[in-house]
Structures are given as structure tokens and as C-alpha cells.
Amino acid sequence: MALEDKRVPVTLLTGFLGAGKTTLLNHLIRDPEAGRIAVIMNEFGDVALDHDLIETATEETVLLQSGCLCCAILGDLAKTLTGLQAKRDAGEVGFDRVVIETSGIADPGPIVHTLVTDHQIARAFRLDGVVTLADAATGMTTLDRQFEAVHQAAIADLLILTKTDLVDPFDLRRFETRLSKINASAKRVHAAHGKVPPGMLFGLTAMRGDVTSAHVVHWLGISTKPAAEVPEVAQVAKSDPLAGLSGILAKPSAPLGFTPSPPATNPRHDHQISSASIEVSDPIPVNIFDAWLDGLVALRGPDILRMKGILHVEGLQYPFVFHGVQHIFDAPVPLKSWTGADTTSRVVVIARGFDEAELNESLKLLLMRPETTPEPQALQGGMMADTSEYPF
Ligand SMILES: Nc1nc2c(ncn2[C@@H]2O[C@H](COP(=O)(O)OP(=O)(O)OP(=O)(O)O)[C@@H](O)[C@H]2O)c(=O)[nH]1
């Protein structure tokens, strides 16, 4: 039976300058179906305009000003969240969830890191999803010019296209295609002037112990085709599974065949973004997964915009869902109530500066099988070493 996660869900609402975040938020907080929401807003610059534009339907609206949330005032976010929690515990305010509206130029990565790694925050709050608004009218140019906008799209669980009324269907399709190349796993919807049913914005990640397999597959956004049916993957699985593994592992300077990141020559274009996914039908030995992950993170950590997946580990009865941004991972969540015979692991990676073939090749390492696999509990270090107990 899965333990109920009682922490307050936090939605990160991001999107480039003028994408329509405040417009959407105004609709949201007026919608009775959205429940009680505490809003944290961040504006970059001296004039706190958005704060004035937000109607006072929420019990608690906090403005974080004079700096960008993703850099200068990350510490303020931690203080604000813990302050909100203290007021809630004291019965001074009531809210069931928090929405953080980032400034338009914020890189959402560091904010996600803070939500996940700050122990005080993570005790009371959990990331419920990243919602990114993409302006269909100006989005193409913004993606060309601003890497923050590319990262905002890449990290999203849900992409909301705004201002679709201002573009013709052909341009809209081109924009959608571009977004799908940056982040194939995010669901995409259109919103006219910020009108989105609240239910669509919430419960986006599968980082909860009580999720269903359908929810996980939806969150990962990849097909449910078994690995054996994917010709390229099946071929690798059948070739000598250990060929190269020990050799690769014996070369710590280039573990698992990854090459160190080349210096970014033009970080402002999303053609440097690639994504890849894999499905592995049989449980993965924990040391294979740890070796793959360690190698990827050690050499290419800063380039990993997002990684998520469900993992069936050899020797464990139930799978885990995991989620990482760059080298930082949420505590993996064991799905103890998982039922059914499906043991397919699914992993999705969105990265910068990778050749897509290289990314696919690295994922195929998850199909390798050593002759003997240590018990998961016996392993030291690595992601799985910390996951034997549900932390909440
Ligand atoms: N035509 C059209 N305009 C929209 C739509 N959504 C929002 N807008 C307008 O876009 C402008 C910017 O919207 P905001 O909600 O302030 O955008 P924001 O993302 O909060 O902006 P920043 O805080 O500056 O980053 C406003 O004038 C909105 O009325 C839409 O679907 N269609």
C-alpha cells in the first residue's frame, strides 16, 4: 500500500516575457475548481506590475522582487515557502497548493533544484509539475534568441500555447513541430487568453507513490512499444551484452562512451537540444543503471536539461519513478502499489549539445547484462542506494 504524500503540491508556472503567465494565473485563482492557491510571483526589475495585476482572490500572494528567482533570490524562495508553511500550520492562512510564477527570463532549472534539494522545503512541499507557456505569436523568434526560453520548453510537463488567435494555422503548426522537437514528452494544449481547466495544470508529474501505470506512461510521453519490437534496440540486446561494458568501465576518463561536453559555441539555438528515450522490457540490474547514470551525469551533467523515467530494478518487487534536472534528482519514488506483470522500464532524456545518435547510443547501455548482479541493497552509492525506504 502506497503511503500518502501529504506535502503541499507546488506548480512552477514559467514562460518567456509576455507569454501570458499572469493572464492564466488570474483565471486560475478565480476558478472555484482550482481550490485554495497561494501564489508566489517573481518579477525582474523595479516595477512590480504583475503583482498589481493579480486579483486578490487568493489568500496569500507573495511577491519576490528585485532579482531573478533563478539566480539572485533563490534563497528568498526557500524563506517564502517555509514562511507560508509556518503561517499555514499556525492557522493564519489556508491553501492546498502553491503556484510559483517565475519571471519571464528565469531559467527554471535552478528553481526545480531548490524545490527538490532544500531539505526544509522538501519536507513540506513537492513539485507537482512544470507548466510552460509558449507565445505562438513571438515564440519562434524567442526560441532563436533566448536559450532560457528553450530551457523553459524543455523542462515542461505541460506546454500551453498562448496567443494562437494571432497566428495562422501554418505558422502555428511550425511552432508546434519545433516545440515537439524540444520536448516530445510534454503534453501540449492551446489556451485562449489564459483559459485552461485547473485540473489540466495539476498532478502533472508521476513522482507520487500512488500513480497508475497509465499516468506514468502519460507523464513520460513515450510509446508503450516493448523494447524487443524496436529493431535497433533489439539488435543491441541480442549482441554480446557484455562486450565493451568492462572495457568501458575500465576507462574512467570516458565512462560509458560519453565524451565531455564541448564548449557551447552558440547556446542560443534549440537545434542543440536533443531528446531520446528507451524502453527496456526486463528489469535492469541496478549496477548497470547506476553505471549508466553516473557516467552520463559525471561527464554531461550540465547538459542534461531533463531526465525522467520509471525503473524496474532486478530483485525489487515494485518500480521507481525518478526525475532529474541536470545532475540533481528528486528522491526516487517507489510505486509500492504497482500491480500487473509489466516490468518495462522507460527512460526519457532531454539534453543540450548532444548528437541524438549519441544520446540513443548511451541509452542502449541500459540493455547490457552482466553475468552476475549484486543485490541492490548491497550496493554503495549511486541513486538506488538511497531509495530502499520511502522518505515521506
Ligand atoms: N491575443 C492574445 N493575447 C493574450 C493571450 N494571452 C495573453 N495575452 C496578452 O498578452 C499580454 C501579456 O500577458 P501577461 O499575462 O502579462 O504575460 P506574462 O507572461 O505574465 O508577462 P511577463 O510577466 O512580462 O513575463 C497581455 O496583454 C495579455 O492580455 C491570448 O491568448 N491571446
Image: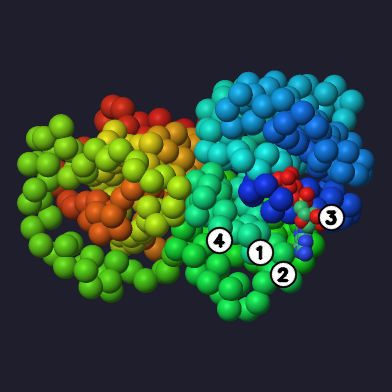
The C terminus lies in which quarter of the figure?
top right
| The image quadrant in which ligand 1 is located | bottom right
- Residue 333: where, in percent of width, then height? 49, 42
The mark that comes first in sequence, 3 or 1, is 3
* Mark 2: C-beta under 8 Å from nearest atom of ligand 1: yes
Mark 1, secondary structure of its residue: loop
Residue topped by disc 2: 166
Question: Secondary structure beneath disc 3?
Answer: helix
Q: CB atoms at circles 4 and 3 under 8 Å apart?
A: no
The 10 Å Cα crowd at callout 2, few under 14, some 14 to 19, many 20 or more, is few
Residue tagged 1: 137
- Inspect the image, locate mark 2, and give the three-letter code of the amino acid beneath it: Leu
Q: Are marks 2 and 1 in contact (CB under 8 Å)?
A: yes
Q: For this view, does 52 lie left or right of residue 251?
A: right
Say if disc 4 is inside 8 Å of ligand 1.
Answer: no
Q: Earlier in the sequence, mark 4 or mark 3?
A: 3
